[in-house]
């Protein structure tokens, strides 16, 4: 059987000939079935019956059977408080293509095709009219159908992909709009649970992103399911390609090829070949898209390895711009003014929390994310569905305060709110506290550039290399060290990089006064001079382990006196570093950290990577 999958239609009245030629291309492949994945009609008509009527003459050109579904734009006039009566598009689709329902199943002897279609959103929970939403009724019916023929392979077709698939997204479009995945603002995780719980789902095709098939993440393999991104045939392409997918299924092989509408031929771009039946794909785990990165630590029984990674944003992270929120969730503030919320367990970026000037400071305190930019301080509630910005002209965040001077750094306060440093002054900023409970202000002789909260104390590293400790109540801070390039504290352990007598020392000490000395491997110590201060970071990882970011590279020390090892990045540089939260497990994971990598390859992307030290027997 041959199936042609057509991505977003998005007709262009000025280029109807492209759609006519694309339909000719499809006919020339002599398919048995054509599956258009939605977003029908031109900009003026999309989302209305006129949009479907506009696209029907092109679909009527096809000689094969057709099974369309609806996309997000097809429901934009009905979702939420839209003026078009709910059910208009679904009824029109059913009548036009003789369907019982917009979603459903096509049965064959050896396999099954499942179709999930976008539906209008309720008025009381519509956070983005462009979300690819499905009702509980549709989801329940799909589960019922999956249970009806256990052990029979299934191919899914949806407009947007499910969360956790790892497919390439478009950050400034679908991630920003919070419609990158099915049900993203409602219950996206049920679709991930679906393909995890049903090994019969061996392939999943989606569109929505308007991208080509040559990217390494246009085809992914997760939890036994192959996910495929489908391009577009018309002018709405985002990378110049105009493509559809072709699926050839026989009793002894499965092939996925590309129908190129520019070359007007079938190509191997993003091709996938499986030399066995679809049934044999169930429980198959042989296909691996990327090699695992790992490296042994010299003179140690430890291996440093990358345990997770996913694409985040379009620009490198700001120094100090990577923050752990909770296990598996991070914020990444990038140079173009976006702060992305990342879930490493699902390889998903859920949305962005700031648009405008790049953030000067960011802190997670309690249930809030605090941000500083220009002369503003603002916050966003970590669990509110409205925490994301969804348009460039939105007034956001809803709560913001104007400061006398820009805030250059901040840290969470144990009693709520944040410590903020404005110029030479540090104070506890908590707008809801009573005036008579406002804490002292601290004024220093040098500008702070790093604040680190540890228990009831605030550690302050100034631009002149002095390190101070303050309880927030006294009028003066306690002097700790000088000539400090950067500093970190975690629990009872503290670490600092000290420059004295033209020597560089990495020091780590604990509450009992133990001090360990780590040496930096470079002969040229000028890279650690003050002008480079803001591009470097230091992490205490516990058990006398350290990690440091120096000039785009990350170095890891397994123990005092050991030679540091550098993370094996093939291309790109690291722009930010932070600790990750690991739960000790039987596989020997001991400590970990996260990095944001700027990939400089032609098709490279900004990556958030999780690294861990694993103890193993040799």
Image (tube, rainbow, N blue to C red):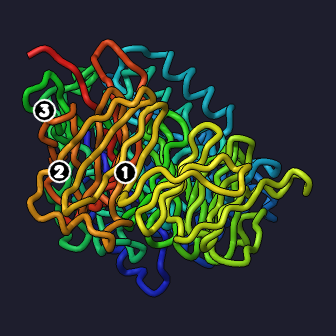
Q: Callout 3: helix, strand or loop?
A: loop
Q: Position of residue 154 (x, y in %)?
A: 38, 29
Q: How far apart are the alpha carbons under marks 3 and 1?
A: 20 Å
Task: Determine whether label 3 and label 2 are within 8 Å by CB.
Answer: no
Residue 297 is marked as: 3
Q: Earlier in the sequence, mark 3 or mark 1?
A: 3
Q: Earlier in the sequence, mark 2 or mark 1?
A: 2
Q: Most extreme residue toward the bottom, as rendered?
A: 14
Please give the residue where the numbered disc 1 appears in the rendered image: 577
Q: How far apart are the alpha carbons under marks 3 and 2?
A: 16 Å
Q: How far apart are the alpha carbons under marks 2 and 1?
A: 18 Å
Residue 520 is marked as: 2
Residue at image location 91% in from the left, 54% down from the top: 436
Residue at image location 68% in from the left, 33% down from the top: 136
Q: Callout 1: helix, strand or loop?
A: strand
Q: Looking at the image, is 135 positioned above or below residue 237?
A: above
Q: Position of 616 compared to 145: left or right?
A: left
Q: Earlier in the sequence, mark 3 or mark 2?
A: 3
Q: Position of residue 174 (x, y in %)?
A: 51, 60
Disc 2 crowd, CA 10 A, few/some/many (<14, 14-19, 20+): some
- Please state which of residues 533 and 119 is positioned toward the viewer in this rendering: 533
Q: Position of residue 279 (x, y in %)?
A: 26, 21
Residue at image location 69% in from the left, 43% down from the top: 367
Q: Report the quarter where the N terminus lies.
A: top left
């Amino acid at each position: 059987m041959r199936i042609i999958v057509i991505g977003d239609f998005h007709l262009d009245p000025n280029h109807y000939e492209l759609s006519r030629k694309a339909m000719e291309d499809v006919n020339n492949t002599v398919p048995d079935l054509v599956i258009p994945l939605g977003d029908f009609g031109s900009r003026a008509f999309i989302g209305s019956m006129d949009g479907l009527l506009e696209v029907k003459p092109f679909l009527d050109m096809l000689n094969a059977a057709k099974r369309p579904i609806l996309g997000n734009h097809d429901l934009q006039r009905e979702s939420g408080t839209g003026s078009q009566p709910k059910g208009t598009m679904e009824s029109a689709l059913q009548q036009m293509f003789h369907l019982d329902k917009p979603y459903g199943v096509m049965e064959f002897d050896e396999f099954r095709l499942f179709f999930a279609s976008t539906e209008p959103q309720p008025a009381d929970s519509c956070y983005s009219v462009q979300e690819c939403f499905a009702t509980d009724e549709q989801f329940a019916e799909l589960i019922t159908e999956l249970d009806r023929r256990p052990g029979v392979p299934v191919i899914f077709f949806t407009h947007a992909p499910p969360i956790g698939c790892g497919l390439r997204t478009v950050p400034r479009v679908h991630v920003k709009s919070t419609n990158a995945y099915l049900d993203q603002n409602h219950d996206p995780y049920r679709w991930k649970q679906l393909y995890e719980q049903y090994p019969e789902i061996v392939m999943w095709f989606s569109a929505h992103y308007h991208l080509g098939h040559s990217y390494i993440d246009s085809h992914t393999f997760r939890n036994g399911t192959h996910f495929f991104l489908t391009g577009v045939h018309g002018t709405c392409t985002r990378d110049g390609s105009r493509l559809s997918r072709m699926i050839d299924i026989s009793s002894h092989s499965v092939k996925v090829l590309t129908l190129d509408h520019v070359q007007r031929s079938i190509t191997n771009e993003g091709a996938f070949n499986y030399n066995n039946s679809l049934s044999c794909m169930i429980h198959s785990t042989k296909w691996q898209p990327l090699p695992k990165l790992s490296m042994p630590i010299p003179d140690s029984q430890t291996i440093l390895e990358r345990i997770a990674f996913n694409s985040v944003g379009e620009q490198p992270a700001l120094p100090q711009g990577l923050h752990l929120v909770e296990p598996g969730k991070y914020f990444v503030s990038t140079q173009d003014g976006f702060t992305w919320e990342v879930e490493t367990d699902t390889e998903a970026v859920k949305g962005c929390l700031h648009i405008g000037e790049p953030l000067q400071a960011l802190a997670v305190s309690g249930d809030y994310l605090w941000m500083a930019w220009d002369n503003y301080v603002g916050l966003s509630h970590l669990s509110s569905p409205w925490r994301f910005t969804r348009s460039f002209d939105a007034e956001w965040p809803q709560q913001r305060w104007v400061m006398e001077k820009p805030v250059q750094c901040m840290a969470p306060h144990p009693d709520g709110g944040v410590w903020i440093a404005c110029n030479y002054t540090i104070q506890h900023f908590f707008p809801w506290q009573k005036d008579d409970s406002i804490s002292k202000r601290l004024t220093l002789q040098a500008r702070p550039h790093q604040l680190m909260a540890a228990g009831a104390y605030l550690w302050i590293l100034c631009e002149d290399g002095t390190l101070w400790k303050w309880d927030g109540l006294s009028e003066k801070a306690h002097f700790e060290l000088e000539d400090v390039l950067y500093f970190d504290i975690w629990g009872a352990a503290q670490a600092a990089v000290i420059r004295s007598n033209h020597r560089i020392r990495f020091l780590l000490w604990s509450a009992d006064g133990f001090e360990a000395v780590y040496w930096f491997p470079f002969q040229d110590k000028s890279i650690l001079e003050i002008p480079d201060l803001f591009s470097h970071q230091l992490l205490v990882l516990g058990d006398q382990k350290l990690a440091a970011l120096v000039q785009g590279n990350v170095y890891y020390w397994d123990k005092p006196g050991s030679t540091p090892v550098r993370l094996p990045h093939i291309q790109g540089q690291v722009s930010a570093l932070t600790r990750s939260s690991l739960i000790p497990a039987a596989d020997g994971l001991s400590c970990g950290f996260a990095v944001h990598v700027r990939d400089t390859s032609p098709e490279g992307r900004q990556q958030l990577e999780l690294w861990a030290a694993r103890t193993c027997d040799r």
